[in-house]
Amino acid sequence: MRNVARARTLVPVSNPLTVPTRWVKFVFAIFLLPICAILSQTFFTAFARATVTQRFWAGEEFWFFSLIALAPYFFPLYSILAIGIYGALSLFVNMQPYGRWLYAVIGATWAFHFTFTCWMIPKNQTDLSDQGTFFSLVVIYLMNVLLLSVMLILASPQITFAGFGADLLINLANFARWILDLFQRH
């Protein structure tokens, strides 16, 4: 005679007023899309201004920056580590002559990060699916463009935080005006 435990299936009791967090995050991500668009427009406007009118494309910073611009995630660990090592060494040694190497290392580590990320995203990453894939990708994009904007400002002497902020406010005002016009038509 065998002893077998009876399997029980527990059915969770759902509260009719409870909204799944994935739905809330999905709606939140939809509201983040205009911010992504405004920040992207400002980034590409500043980038175009720096590369075309101010000849940013002719300098070394541009070529190293264009590797960096491929990154889909906002925290490239190896690039941050390289910057930290460079900063720590600069406390003891004049690192100014090695600035080119810093740009090259950041570009290479960020390119590695990009290729690794592109390889991993379609592999059912639980960190993306647990929070909602759409929400995760929108936040990743937003943080990436924000970091790229900061890197562009730091790499280009012609672009300042104040100028970038002014462009951002202009694009935000244009977007708000477009939304108001859209609602007034209907």
Image: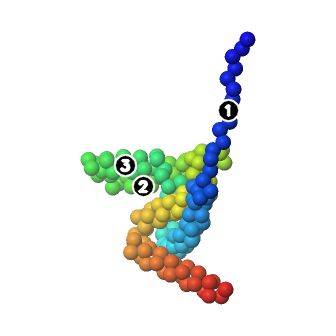
The quarter of the rendered structure image containing the N terminus is top right
Which numbered disc covers residue 165?
none
Tell me which colouring the rendered structure shows. Answer: rainbow
Dividing the picture into quadrants, the one containing residue 33 is: bottom right
Q: CA distance from mark 2 to mark 1?
A: 65 Å
Residue type of the residue flagged with mark 3: Gly
Label 3 CA crowd tier, 10 Å (few <14, some 14–19, many 20+): few
Q: Position of residue 51 (x, y in %)?
A: 51, 71
Dot 1 lies on which element? loop
Residue type of the residue flagged with mark 2: Arg
Dot 3 lies on which element? helix
The quarter of the rendered structure image containing the C terminus is bottom right
Q: Which of 82 and 149 lies nearest the eye of the viewer?
A: 149
Dot 2 lies on which element? helix
Q: CA distance from mark 2 to mark 3?
A: 16 Å
Residue pointed to by mark 1: 8
Q: Position of residue 176 (x, y in %)?
A: 54, 81
Residue pointed to by mark 2: 100
Residue type of the residue flagged with mark 1: Arg
Q: Position of residue 5 (x, y in %)?
A: 67, 23
Q: Which of 37 and 185 lies nearest the eye of the viewer?
A: 185
Residue pointed to by mark 3: 84
Judged left or right of residue 56, residue 26 is right
In this rendering, does residue 151 appear at all? Answer: yes
Residue 100 higher or lower than 50, as above or below: above
Mark toward the start of the polypeptide (2 vs 1) = 1
